[in-house]
Image: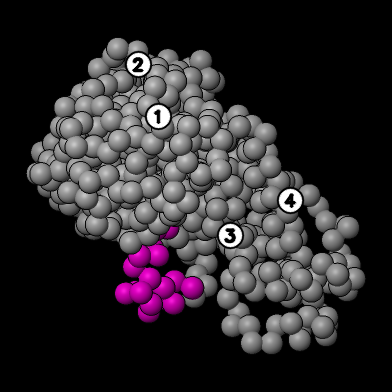
């Protein structure tokens, strides 16, 4: 890493206090880690640099709200994973309109695949090459886990960092990594079987109709054959462990073009880059960016973001070395009018805990149909996962199933008391049965005790917008209006919309009558 924990914690504190040099040193120190996680997870996609830049802009914006400076590394990786996920969603939403482009991207290009470049440069053995080929067979989420495990093997991340970044316990993170490794080994077997000369005759029959693309459906079909085939698994006992092969692959070097782009945005200086051992290259900023004036204005915007966590970043097109780079943020300046917290009067009568609700979903709250959130005891049902309700496990919000036969505790956990927003009475705040509140922290929804701070009040205030279907609501964070509560990956996160119907459904909830009596 180049920095010990104590060192980077001090830099975080200084950067939060507005020290530009500390912020630049922090970015320079962690840029190689960030670039390798993104580059490996996206397999060298052309948008790697853009995702890295968007991640760093979000890090700078949210840095003042980081409560534990010593957790900066895992916090950074957590934001990185969400940006990778956002990139994938955007790619999928454009798939129907960019079929020709997507097909072009599938054409092998040594310049676009950093692993392939490393293979050519280092004259990798067949096993190393097969590992790289096997990565292409992994599911996207396993590819991300591989990029994290890669950094763990290299000593840049700890298992605790990975657990914190993914919102899992250390034990659960270990289980997820083990599943990824099993899929990687399975994919290595597939690659070796496909390249075998002569190829197993039975495998040839399995491949009938295969289009040559590394899709999960074909991975499963081929795996069903290779698992029980002594011919296809003949070499598996002599394999070099994957972690040793990964370590023999060179780390991805941060390109000079990205460093120049970050410098133009005021995120990184040549001095900080050089001190961190990053390659720098001269760039003609005077002509391409409009000279010092634009550079200074960007630094000013970033300084404003650093000084106040509630200020949104409003940027236009930034021209760097003759190309247009856009920093896109989904946060609108104002909430839409006419959508607010409804008064308690008119809200439905909660269902007592000693009564039996109907077998189907509880009736929709009358005021929820009008696009508002009624105050009082309510339960929130997911739009795209009917019968799943907002609940919590330990300290983290999630979705859970509830029915008439559920225990009193289960029904209590899906019941929240909605009160007027702690930071804005036009919005709402959720209170659980144990007196704690739901608030976002590190972009994830969790239960927390009110500490009386302004930051807590902001984090615990959510403003309703019309949802994806009639009678549903989408809840935006008061201090990040364009980021909304959305369920994914087993939790409830604060994410900016990618414009897809799937996202809208994941971010929409129907207000139902409470499954239990409010405390």
**Relative height, residue 423 to residue 489 (above, below):** above
**Relative height, residue 218 to residue 51 (above, below):** below
What label does residue 139 carry, if any?
3
The span from disc 1 to disc 4 (Cα, nearest Å) is 54 Å
Q: Are marks 2 and 3 in contact (CB under 8 Å)?
A: no
Q: Are marks 1 and 4 in contact (CB under 8 Å)?
A: no
Foreground mark, 2 or 3, reads 2
Residue depicted at x 33% and y 32%: 377
Which contiguous range is marked in magenta?
87-106
Q: Quadrant of the N terminus?
A: top right
Foreground mark, 2 or 4, reads 2
Residue depicted at x 48% and y 32%: 354
Q: Residues within 10 Å of mark 4 (few under 14, many from 20)?
A: some
Q: Is residue 4 visible?
A: yes
SS of the residue at dot 1? loop
Foreground mark, 1 or 3, reads 1
Foreground mark, 1 or 4, reads 1
SS of the residue at dot 4? helix
Residue depicted at x 44% and y 77%: 103
SS of the residue at dot 3? loop
Residue under circle 4?
242
Mark 2 vs 4, N-terminal side: 4
Q: Position of residue 440 (x, y in %)?
A: 36, 31
The span from disc 2 to disc 3 (Cα, nearest Å) is 40 Å
Residue under circle 2?
450
The span from disc 2 to disc 4 (Cα, nearest Å) is 47 Å
Mark 1 vs 2, N-terminal side: 2
Residue under circle 1?
517
Q: Position of residue 434 (x, y in %)?
A: 44, 20
């Amino acid at each position: 890493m180049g920095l010990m924990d104590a060192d980077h914690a001090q830099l975080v504190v200084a950067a939060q206090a507005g020290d530009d040099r500390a912020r630049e040193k922090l970015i320079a120190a962690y840029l190689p880690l960030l670039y390798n996680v993104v580059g490996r997870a996206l397999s060298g996609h052309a948008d790697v640099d853009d995702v890295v830049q968007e991640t760093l802009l979000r890090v700078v914006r949210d840095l003042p709200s980081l409560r534990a400076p010593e957790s900066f590394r895992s916090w950074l990786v957590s934001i990185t994973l969400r940006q990778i996920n956002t990139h994938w969603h955007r790619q999928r939403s454009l798939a129907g309109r960019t079929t020709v482009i997507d097909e072009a991207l599938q054409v092998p290009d040594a310049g676009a695949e950093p692993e392939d470049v490393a293979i050519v440069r280092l004259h990798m053995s067949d096993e190393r090459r097969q590992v790289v080929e096997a990565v292409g067979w992994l599911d996207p989420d396993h590819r991300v886990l591989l990029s994290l495990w890669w950094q763990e093997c290299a000593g840049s991340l700890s298992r605790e960092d990975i657990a914190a970044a993914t919102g899992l316990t250390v034990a659960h993170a270990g289980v997820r990594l083990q599943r990824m490794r099993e899929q990687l080994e399975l994919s290595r077997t597939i690659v070796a079987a496909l390249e075998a000369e002569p190829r197993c005759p039975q495998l040839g029959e399995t491949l009938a109709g295969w289009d040559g693309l590394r899709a999960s459906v074909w991975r499963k079909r081929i795996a069903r054959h290779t698992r029980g085939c002594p011919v296809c698994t003949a070499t598996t006992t002599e394999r070099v462990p994957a972690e040793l092969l990964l370590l023999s692959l060179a780390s991805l070097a941060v390109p000079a073009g990205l460093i120049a782009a970050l410098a133009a945005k005021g995120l990184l200086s040549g001095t900080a880059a050089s001190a961190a051992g990053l390659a720098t290259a001269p760039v003609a900023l005077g002509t391409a960016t409009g000279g010092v004036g634009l550079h200074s204005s960007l630094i000013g915007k970033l300084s404003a973001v650093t000084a106040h966590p509630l200020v949104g970043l409003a940027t236009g097109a930034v021209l760097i070395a003759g190309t247009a780079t856009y920093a896109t943020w989904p946060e609108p300046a104002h909430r839409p009018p006419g959508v607010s917290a409804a008064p308690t009067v008119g809200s439905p009568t909660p269902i007592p805990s000693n009564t039996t609700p109907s077998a189907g979903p509880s009736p929709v709250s009358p005021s929820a149909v009008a696009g508002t959130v009624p105050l009082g005891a309510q339960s929130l049902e997911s739009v795209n996962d009917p019968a799943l309700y907002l609940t919590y496990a330990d300290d983290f919000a999630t979705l859970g199933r509830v029915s008439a036969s559920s225990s009193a505790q289960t029904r209590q956990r899906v019941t929240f008391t909605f009160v007027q927003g702690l930071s804005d009475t036009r919005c709402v705040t959720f209170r659980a049965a144990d007196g704690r509140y739901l608030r976002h922290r590190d972009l994830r929804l969790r239960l927390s005790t009110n500490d009386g701070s302004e930051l807590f009040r902001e984090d615990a205030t959510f403003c309703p917008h019309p949802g994806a279907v009639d009678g549903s609501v989408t809840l935006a964070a008061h201090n990040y209006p364009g980021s909304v509560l959305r369920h994914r990956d087993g939790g409830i996160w604060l994410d900016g919309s990618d414009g897809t119907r799937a996202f809208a459904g994941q971010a929409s909830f129907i207000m139902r009558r409470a499954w239990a009596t409010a405390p």
